[in-house]
Amino acid sequence: MKLKTLLLILILGVFPSFAFSYSCPMKIGDVNQAISELDITKHGAIIEAAKMLRTKGEEAHKNGDHQLSEDILAAALRLLDV
């Protein structure tokens, strides 16, 4: 009985962390969406900077550095929040 309880606690503790950690692709989509909603004539420089950050975040994700990727993509989203 103790083994089943321990296993259940372990499963419930680990799986949610996998579901919410390293959401790089979702953040890339959020950046793309935010870019598409801005007027390029008013915010061209911001859009270009955000695209550069998105590219760097995507590269970090592909290289397996998910925390760096999430940090870079979060910076892009903050930049796009004009």
Image: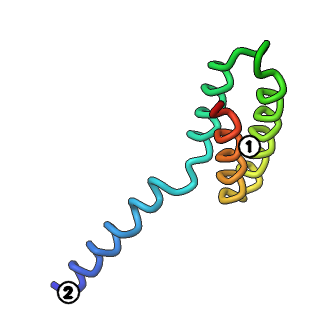
Instruction: Decide: is 69 above or below 13.
Output: above
Instruction: From the image, state whether disc 2 or disc 1 is nearer to you.
Output: 1
- Left/right placement of residue 23 relative to residue 76 reads left
**Which quadrant: the C terminus?**
top right
Q: Residues within 10 Å of mark 2 (few under 14, many from 20)?
A: few
Residue at position x 78%, y 30% in the image: 46
Q: Which x, y percent locates residue 65? A: 72, 59
The disc at residue 2 is 2
Residue 31's quadrant in the figure?
top right
Q: Which x, y percent locates residue 68? A: 72, 57
Residue at position x 74%, y 49% in the image: 62
Q: Amino acid at mark 1?
A: Glu
Query: Helix, strand or loop at disc 2?
Result: helix
**Label 2, label 1: how far apart the Cα atoms are:** 43 Å
The disc at residue 58 is 1
How many labels sit on residues?
A: 2
Residue at position x 39%, y 59% in the image: 16
The disc at residue 6 is none
Residue at position x 65%, y 51% in the image: 70
Q: Amino acid at mark 2?
A: Lys
Instruction: Decide: is 18 above or below 29.
Output: below
- Left/right placement of residue 22 relative to residue 62 reads left
* Sooner in the amino-acid sequence: mark 2 or mark 1: 2
- Of 5 and 49, which appears nearest the observer? 49
- Of 23 and 81, which appears nearest the observer? 81
**Which quadrant: the N terminus?**
bottom left
Query: Helix, strand or loop at disc 1?
Result: helix
- Of 24 and 50, which appears nearest the observer? 50
Residue 5's quadrant in the figure?
bottom left
Q: Which x, y percent locates residue 67? A: 66, 59
Q: Which x, y percent locates residue 24? A: 62, 46
Residue 2's quadrant in the figure?
bottom left
